[in-house]
Amino acid sequence: MAASTTRLSTLYPHIPPSAIESFHAHLASSTRVLALLGAGLSASSGLPTFRGAGGLWRTHEATDLATPQAFSADPGLVWQFYSYRRHMALNVKPNMAHYALAEFAKKMPGFQTLSQNVDGLSPRAGHPAEQLKLLHGSLFDVKCHNFFCNYVETANYTDPIVPALALPTDEDVDLTTNAAREASREARELDIADISVALPDVPETALPHCPSCGGLLRPGVVWFGESLPAGVLETVDAFLEDPLGVDLILVIGTSARVFPAAGYIEIARSRGARVAVINTEMDLPPGQLTKDDWFFQGDAAVIVPELLRPVVGDLEGVEEKL
Ligand code: BJW
Ligand code: ZN
């Protein structure tokens, strides 16, 4: 038995060695591979998912705040939600699965990754940009909310993006020196996801504003009812419509409830792909899994590096970055 099969079967005895071996055999003959990534990929880095436990921010469902209507109704609240998530994402690290996927992309030119995640962890793991399509944008892009203005900023990592969005602290912060301010903030930041913590009142004038038109800026993510980023749908369609077809789709840490992302699983299947699902739960819509699919139940951060090990190897040097 291969080392990766033994390791995974030891960690997760419910995964039959035969399933790992048949997956590895298929991987060995695959040249065109897709991955559909969701929030579960980043769960063991410490970021909450959208649905189920952890999907509540204060009293709000995270998905209720991810709408243009929520932003128009209360831009201060929505900016506090996204500023909090920017801060969280900047303070966690990519996990072994992000690194394994990044390495897999470097080794396999016919690999394309469709990520629904906006947390920036795949780019930070070194995933080649041309093999990473950010279906739902990025927390670190910012754009103008004014329909008639095209202002966009990419890779804005300023945290907080404006001073008014700094997390509250449990005492007055010593503002006399930068060092004291940083130390104090780290020690005493309050978790505004928790309803028992008072949310600071942020006036609209203190939110990020567009340097071009003076309108409000908003996070560069894709909210419900909005189109996916220009060019992304075309690239995905071109990959799926290629006469060479698709050999395999890895469906990692997603509940596959949001379209068009979720629809790519069945489209890939119709183009010949076998489907491998990696998830802590059997969470796909009923009937989506067939007998030829693989379901590897467990933490993506553990399972993905073992599944990809025949191609990516030991990922030397990565442990030190975790
Ligand atoms: C682990 C784990 C571990 C945990 N290891 N696993 C067709 C039919 C019906 C509706 C539509 C349709 N086509 C379009 C729509 C409308 C809509 C839609 O899909 N609605 C559905 C709710 C039905 N789609 C849209 O509006 C999209 N736009 C669009 O289609 O434009 C054209 C159009 C416009 C107008 C009308 C019609 C068409 C845009 C969708 C944008 C989604 N945006 C969000 C927010 C992004 C910003 C932000 O981050 O705040 O994207 S919503 C949210 O859901 C976020 C996520 O990317 C997305 C998917 O969630 P994900 O990643 O699957 O997370 P979870 O929490 O659901 O699942 C986590 C999984 O991980 C679970 O399964 C766990 O078990 C697992 N897990 N720990 C492995 N350690
Ligand atoms: Zn503007």
Image (spheres, rainbow, N blue to C red):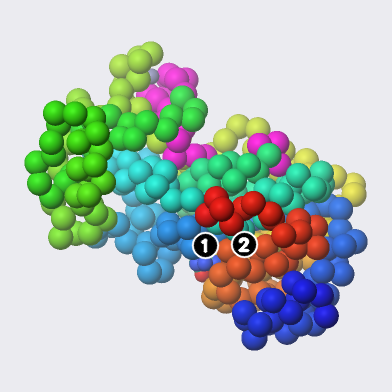
Label 2 sits on what residue type?
A: Ile
The residue drawn where x is 74% and y is 72% is 4
What's drawn in magenta, residue-wise? Answer: 129-152
Estimate the spatial distance between the alpha carbons at disc 1 and disc 2, rounded to whole Å: 7 Å
Residue tagged by mark 2? 252
Whichever of labels 1 and 2 marks the residue nearer the N terminus, that label is: 1
Identify which residue, 161 or 316, lies in the foreground.
316
**Mark 1 touching mark 2, by CB under 8 A?**
yes
* Quarter assignment of residue 263: bottom right
User: Mark 2 packing: few (<14 Cα in 10 Å), some, or many (20+)?
Assistant: many
Query: In the figure, is residue 164 to the left or right of 232?
Result: left
Residue 30 lies in the magenta stretch? no
Judge whether 305 appears above or below 214 on screen. Answer: below
The residue drawn where x is 60% and y is 32% is 230
Q: Secondary structure at mark 1?
A: helix
Distance from mark 1 CB to nearest ligand 1 atom below 8 Å: yes
Residue tagged by mark 1? 40
Distance from mark 2 CB to nearest ligand 1 atom below 8 Å: yes
Q: Position of residue 195 (x, y in %)?
A: 19, 59
